[in-house]
Amino acid sequence: MQESLCSASPQSVGRGAPRDAGCALPRPAEAGRSHAGAARERLWGGPGAGARTQVPPQRVLSWSLGRPRSRSHCRAREMLPRAAWSLVLRKGGGGRRGMHSSEGTTRGGGKMSPYTNCYAQRYYPMPEEPFCTELNAEQQALKEKEKGSWTQLTHAEKVALFPPKPITLTDEWKAQQLQRMLDMKVNPVQGLASRWDYEKKQWKK
Amino acid sequence: MAHATQVGLQDATSPIMEELIIFHDHALMIIFLICFLVLYALFLTLTTKLTNTSISDAQEMETVWTILPAIILVLIALPSLRILYMTDEVNDPSFTIKSIGHQWYWTYEYTDYGGLIFNSYMLPPLFLEPGDLRLLDVDNRVVLPVEAPVRMMITSQDVLHSWAVPTLGLKTDAIPGRLNQTTFTATRPGVYYGQCSEICGANHSFMPIVLELIPLKIFEMGPVFTL
């Protein structure tokens, strides 16, 4: 089955293709997961957080990923959290704003794949860039054909050109999501969780 | 949060939202009654075999269809104003959090007891763990205590945003240069989701809000849990 191609649409990047998509996208080094305990730890910081009673007049450096911050990081200005984040990731320098490339400022420069680009900017999770930039000859030919009249495309070709569905729409993920929603007791009064019998672990009759 | 095909309101997590749900049902019932009445009158008008082309001077009918809607409007306005003033009640919040909107993430500041400031970014799809909610989950949630009045001060760094959590009945605009205040008291622990509700650029849909409400005793314990 022909691999799905990706068109340059804002949504296409976010459509998580199967994790083993045609282009080898780098897996993130660490994912900022938030579970209750981890969130509490980040809220209050590790041991000794109670000793920090004095708030410096300027803003404290923002916390990301629950990393303990040393005193030297406490001199923070507006841009510092963003720069620190990219330092943490060790990618891309200062992000799009800090890049100076000969290609101008439209695309942020460089041959970095969109996912490494958007790692440097957490606030732009779905950039308007193609999902895959490395296409084989057959896919390239199809992209050229797409530039012509769309009535000449076969049904299979149209399906291939369409952005891939997000991974979260697979049955397995939807089942895990439903289980998580039931564990969270979402809408327990009259909604979803109210229709689930927690003792018998089945839907109420 | 809402499940996939949900049409109605989410269950209430605060007393104000409970009142809003009751009011919503009340107003919706009145709307359905009026719509049904109008459709019935229209149906009768279109299917009648009677013809009378010289009706005039129907003072009684006109009086009725002026007074009756006025009464219905008063019946809608009184509960509405009651809830409006209820939301403005001063309930002596025990905790204040600042929420600052940026393009395209939120910053939360807990500066009451010590200083804690962090950013809350949406998890990109590649970062999701199995079972996570796409476009809703964030990396750092806003951790808050249950059954304690909380004051949120909301503002923005750049453009208009809006901090909304439907299950708590909250939606407050984040306006640059202005500090808006909203208070709430949550009644149930859990994780509650919301999304930015004022168009703010390319990634307006990708800056959600996630509250994690935990029991007050655990919240007060503070730095006990470690990763």
Image (spheres, coloured by chain):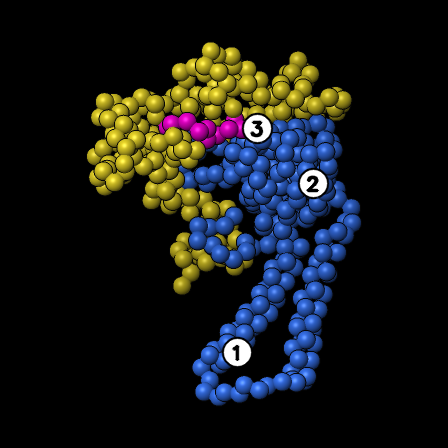
**Which residue, given by chain and number where applicable, does mark 1 sit on?**
B41
Give the quarter of the image for residue A175: top left
- Asked where in the image residue B134 lies, by quadrant, the reply is top left
The picture places residue A129, in percent across and down from the top left corner, at 41, 27
**Residue A137, above or below B220:** above
Q: Residue at x 34, y 25 (%)?
A: A132
Q: Which residues are magenta?
A: A122-131
A6 horizontally vs B31: left or right: left
Query: According to the image, label 3 marks what residue?
Result: B226
- Are discs 1 and 2 less than 8 Å apart at CB? no
Q: Is residue B156 magenta?
A: no
Same chain? Circles 1 and 2: yes
Q: Residue at x 48, y 12 (%)?
A: A101
Secondary structure at numbered mark 2: strand
Task: Identify residue type, mark 1.
Answer: Ala
Give above or below for A179 relative to A194.
above
Q: Quadrant of the C terminus of chain A?
A: bottom left
Report the front residue among A126 and A64: A126
